[in-house]
Image (cartoon, rainbow, N blue to C red):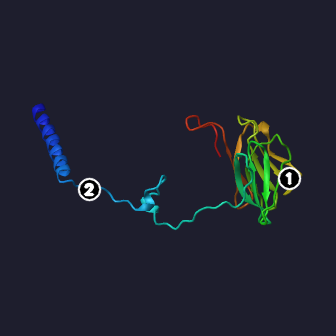
Amino acid sequence: MDKLLLIMALASVLALADTNADASDANTELPALELPGKLKSAVPLPMAEADLPSVVAREYFKVSEKPLQLECPTFDEQGNLIFCEVFGGTVFRLTADKKLSGFLPDPALRPAGLAVHRNGRIYMAELGDFVSRGSVLSMAANGTDVQPIVSRDAGFLPDDLVFDKEGGFYFTDFKGGSSTSTGGV
């Protein structure tokens, strides 16, 4: 049986060599899949998405010349964009006429998630020490009247948050990783 398998393998190799010889002798190319230009980029779209409408992004507003970790975009009741910078600990407000201002009740906070409650208050998930002592805070729209909702002593590392229809909220606990999943929602 082993001799039969060896003979079949040798026959396959010879047939392949013969095919390649014929192709090079005839100076013809082997058949290949023809890809549309949209799929020949450095980051090609999947074929199923290649014909979807798309637009090219353009810069709307430059926050800083420095590299920043910008996160958690949301809109307030006036339509202003609110977002934060995690490591510098700033919450920004960008108005429709492109005026940028920053606020934060405490520079030791590390904001990572923002959501605006239907009552207009801003809720912030903050990473604290980035290990096990973060919190969730509520504040007035201008950053005053700060109230703790989830204390740093609770042992969570809040990263993002969202409100449900009734006004309650969910937040992610950013502890652990894929192999040590100690965090959660």
Q: Can residue 170 be seen in this view?
A: no
Identify the residue at image location x=14%, y=37%.
10
Q: Sort mark 2 into few (<14), some (14-19) or many (20+) by Cα contacts within 10 Å.
A: few
- Circle 1 crowding by C-alpha within 10 Å: few under 14, some 14–19, many from 20: some
Mark closer to the chain start, 2 or 1: 2
Q: Is residue 35 visible?
A: yes
Q: Label 1, on which residue?
A: 143
Residue type pointed to by label 2: Pro
- Please state the horizontal and vertical placement of residue 169, each as a whole percent of the image: 72, 53
Callout 1: SS: loop
Please name the residue that numbered disc 2 is placed on.
Answer: 31
- Counting every numbered tag in the picture gives 2
Nearer-the-camera pick, 170 or 103: 103
Q: Residue furthest bottom?
A: 53
Instruction: In the displayed orientation, state which residue is furthest to the right.
Output: 145
Mark sitting on residue 129: none
User: Could you tell me residue 34's position as x and y percent?
Assistant: 34, 60
Give the image quarter of residue 57: bottom right
Residue at x 58% of width, y 34% of height:
180
Q: In which quarter of the image is the N terminus?
A: top left
Amino acid type at mark 1: Gly
Question: In the rendered view, does 58 fall on the left or right side of 95?
Answer: left
Q: Which quarter of the figure has residue 184?
A: top right
Nearer the observer: mark 2 or 1; the answer is 2
94 w.r.t. 134: above or below: below
